[in-house]
Image: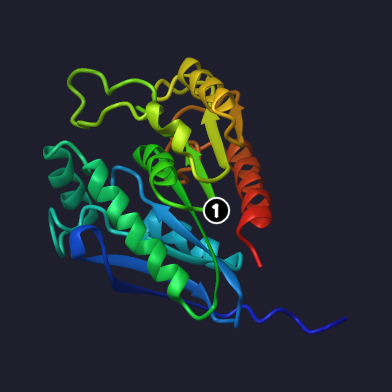
Amino acid sequence: MGHPMYDAMMAETISITGHGGDQIEAYLSRPLGPGPSGGVVVIHHMPGYDEGSKEITRKFAAHGYLAICPNLHYREAPGASPDDAAAASRAQGGVPDDRLVGDVAGAVAYLRAMPASNGKAGTIGYCSGGRQSFLAACSLPLDAAVDCYGAFVIGPPPEGMPLQVGPIVHLAKDLSCPLLGLFGDDDSYPAPVEVAELDKVLTEAGKPHEFHSYAGAGHAFFNVTRPSYRPEAAVDGWQKIWDFYGRLLAG
């Protein structure tokens, strides 16, 4: 039979050094085995550092990864509820790109310094975090990146949307690691035509990437708390994530 895997894990709120030396809040979840383990930075969606984002962070730990979710809205509203912090961030046009890169760099440094780390680290982001996962992977030396329906990589947000971010497709040439993209065919942000454009740009730049688009799925199809949840697409998407990280981050 062999011995069962030791499966204890721990999850807690910690403080990490983010952009500009700022101390920010983050949620760390890790297996309690000796490792060595790969590290994952979970980049939360626009609604913020919420219960769903923490649950995803624990899911990575349950699969053997050191996982950390930095609270990207912490400076706007220290100690506030995720909803209030997200509202405060929206009012300022969202998380500035340079600050995002600094905060993810801090999270990566924290993961790589952990005794159980194998030195490898990747990112995953959902919604606005999908764009930010791509941004981080083009700005930092990473081992793997996952973009779950990240919008505004190709085009800017439409008029009236509070998010004040610009296209970042010009950074594709700097992508430091393989990219997995998971998209919904029924999504408007990003629309399938934008996904196709990014695919083309990455191919032309010679950057390793694999994109999967799901029929019948729109934006936020991974989100179990929303009507947009699509179990078949989400289950397949998670399997793609485990395969991808298994090759590039694990062990």
Q: Position of residue 44 (x, y in %)?
A: 36, 50
Front in this rendered view, residue 189 or 232? 189
Extreme residue toward the top, this view: 193
Where residue 96 sits, quadrant-wise, is top left
Colour scheme shown: rainbow
| Image position of 25 with respect to 231: above or below | below
Q: Which of the 4 image quadrants contains residue 206?
A: top right
Q: Which residue is mark 1?
A: 143
The structure residue drawn at horizontal position 45% and vertical position 32%, both measured from the top left corner, is 172
Residue displayed at 23% across by 57% down: 19
* SS for callout 1: loop
Q: Is residue 66 above or below residue 139?
A: below
Compared with 138, 35 (above or below) is below
Q: Amino acid at mark 1?
A: Asp
Residue 138 horizontal/vertical position (percent): 42, 41
Going 54% across and 36% down the picture, which residue do you hit?
181
On the rendered structure, is 147 left or right of 25?
Answer: right
